[in-house]
Image (cartoon, helix red, strand yellow):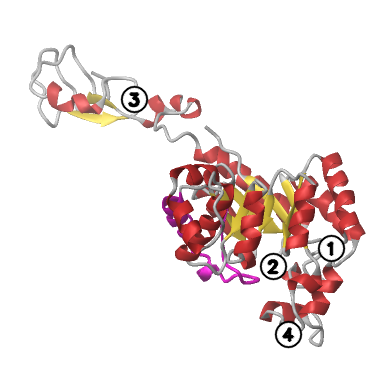
């Protein structure tokens, strides 16, 4: 049975603070065949303090004298813009998604009644934000960049407590108890998907570690996808072949534009190629049943072999080991009958290559 991988076009902050560019990214995501277009919702002052430094990749791709706080302020989307983007996404038949980076932004996204909310890797350890999202009953996609397996388990314990039936106060002991509670784990499984991720832009291929997806599936019994920050899209396609249920990939209108994420993004044409490649891989994965397909059955008599005479034989002559062999076409007795024919009498006079 063919599965459908959820493909997220991560517009992120590639709109550079411009609503017109953000709308163009919605259009590009829809045209490329993505299921979801995702943005980032934050208040710069609530997200970063004055002392916050830019990451190396941000320093390389933005003005050197611009602080992280100033950069974030420049890239903010006002709340009103979200309504415009949601309406455009609805018109184009694509789901709108966003990542909150502070409590007020989470509350705002919850008020929009979105189908799901994405929590970024940087907030995997932000227990109050996670707990608030779970308490609200939100369906979540949780990114796990920079995290150990133990840190992911801790975050899932927070979510399990939030989703679970327990009304007890939150805290480390309560989170660990929720993780052990089958009812809370069941509620968690109904709401949460994980994304394997390496938080570097662009991500070196040697740091991808796609095998970690299987580790996470086994450890947590949750759907696992992949958030891809590598150059190109072959790693995303490989992730689908390895069972990723979600693929998230940055989308930009111009990879050469100045901004923190443009260089690690795909332009629309390549994003569309990625979508096509993923859909082809989904079809190629099939149902796992090993049996000949309709397209190959007609080739059975052409490619397989039958038992034929290796030399001229008279009717009734005893067939020796060197008297028969296997040759195409495969329209006669199968080669597995070789040993049962040796020592029997030729049924009729045979010329070389005559089938038995």
Q: Earlier in the sequence, mark 1 or mark 4?
A: 1
The residue carrying mark 3 is: 330
Q: Nearer the viewer, residue 127 or 40?
A: 127
On the image, the x and y values in percent for residue 61 come to 76, 78
Tag 2 and tag 1, C-beta contact below 8 Å: no
Q: Earlier in the sequence, mark 2 or mark 4?
A: 4
Residue 210 in sight from this viewpoint: no
> In the image, which is nearer the foreground, mark 1 or mark 4?
4
The residue carrying mark 4 is: 51
The residue carrying mark 1 is: 15
**Is residue 190 depicted above or below 119 in this figure?**
above
Tag 1 and tag 3, C-beta contact below 8 Å: no
On the image, the x and y values in percent for residue 41 come to 78, 60
Q: Secondary structure at mark 2?
A: helix
> In the image, which is nearer the foreground, mark 2 or mark 3?
2
Q: Is residue 62 magenta?
A: no
Q: Secondary structure at mark 3?
A: loop
Q: Earlier in the sequence, mark 1 or mark 3?
A: 1
> In the image, which is nearer the foreground, mark 2 or mark 1?
1
Label for residue 264?
A: 2
On the image, the x and y values in percent for residue 339 come to 13, 27
Q: Is residue 312 left or right of residue 77?
A: left
> In the image, which is nearer the foreground, mark 1 or mark 3?
1
Q: Residues within 10 Å of mark 2 (few under 14, many from 20)?
A: many
Q: Give the residues in magenta.
A: 194-220
**Is residue 277 depicted above or below 45 in this figure?**
above
On the image, the x and y values in percent for residue 71 come to 81, 76
Q: Residues within 10 Å of mark 3 (few under 14, many from 20)?
A: some
Q: Is residue 59 left or right of residue 306?
A: right
- Name the quarter where the C terminus is drawn: top left
Disc 4 and disc 3: Cα gap in Å?
76 Å
């Amino acid at each position: 049975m063919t599965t459908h991988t959820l493909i997220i076009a991560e517009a992120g902050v590639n709109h550079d603070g411009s609503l017109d560019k953000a709308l163009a990214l919605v259009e590009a995501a829809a045209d490329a065949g993505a299921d979801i277009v995702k943005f980032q919702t934050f208040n710069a002052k609530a997200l970063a303090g004055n002392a916050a430094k830019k990451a190396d990749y941000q320093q390389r791709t933005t003005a050197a004298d611009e602080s992280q706080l100033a950069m974030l302020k420049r890239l903010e989307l006002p709340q009103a813009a979200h309504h415009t983007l949601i309406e455009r996404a609805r018109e184009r038949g694509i789901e709108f998604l966003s990542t909150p980076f502070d409590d007020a932004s989470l509350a705002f996204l919850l008020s929009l009644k979105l189908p799901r909310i994405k929590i970024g890797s940087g907030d995997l350890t932000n227990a109050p934000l996670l707990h608030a999202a779970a308490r609200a009953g939100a369906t979540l996609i949780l990114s796990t960049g920079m995290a150990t397996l133990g840190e992911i388990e801790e975050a899932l314990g927070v979510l399990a407590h939030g989703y679970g039936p327990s009304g007890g106060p939150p805290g480390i002991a309560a989170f660990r108890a929720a993780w052990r509670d089958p009812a809370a784990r069941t509620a968690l499984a109904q709401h949460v998907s994980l994304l394997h991720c390496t938080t570097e832009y662009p991500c070196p291929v040697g740091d991808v570690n796609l095998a970690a997806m299987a580790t996470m599936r086994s450890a947590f019994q949750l759907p696992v996808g992949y958030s891809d920050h590598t150059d190109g899209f072959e790693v995303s396609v490989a992730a689908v072949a390895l069972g990723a249920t979600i693929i998230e990939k940055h989308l930009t209108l111009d990879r050469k534009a100045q901004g923190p994420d443009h260089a690690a993004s795909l332009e629309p044409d390549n994003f569309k190629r990625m979508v096509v490649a993923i859909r082809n891989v989904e079809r190629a994965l099939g149902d796992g049943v090993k049996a000949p397909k309709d397209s190959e059955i007609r080739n059975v008599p052409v490619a397989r072999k039958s038992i034929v005479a290796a030399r001229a034989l008279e009717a009734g002559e005893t067939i020796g080991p060197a008297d028969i062999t296997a040759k195409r076409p495969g329209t006669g007795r199968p080669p597995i009958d070789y040993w049962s024919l040796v020592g029997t009498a030729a049924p009729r006079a045979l010329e070389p290559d005559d089938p038995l």
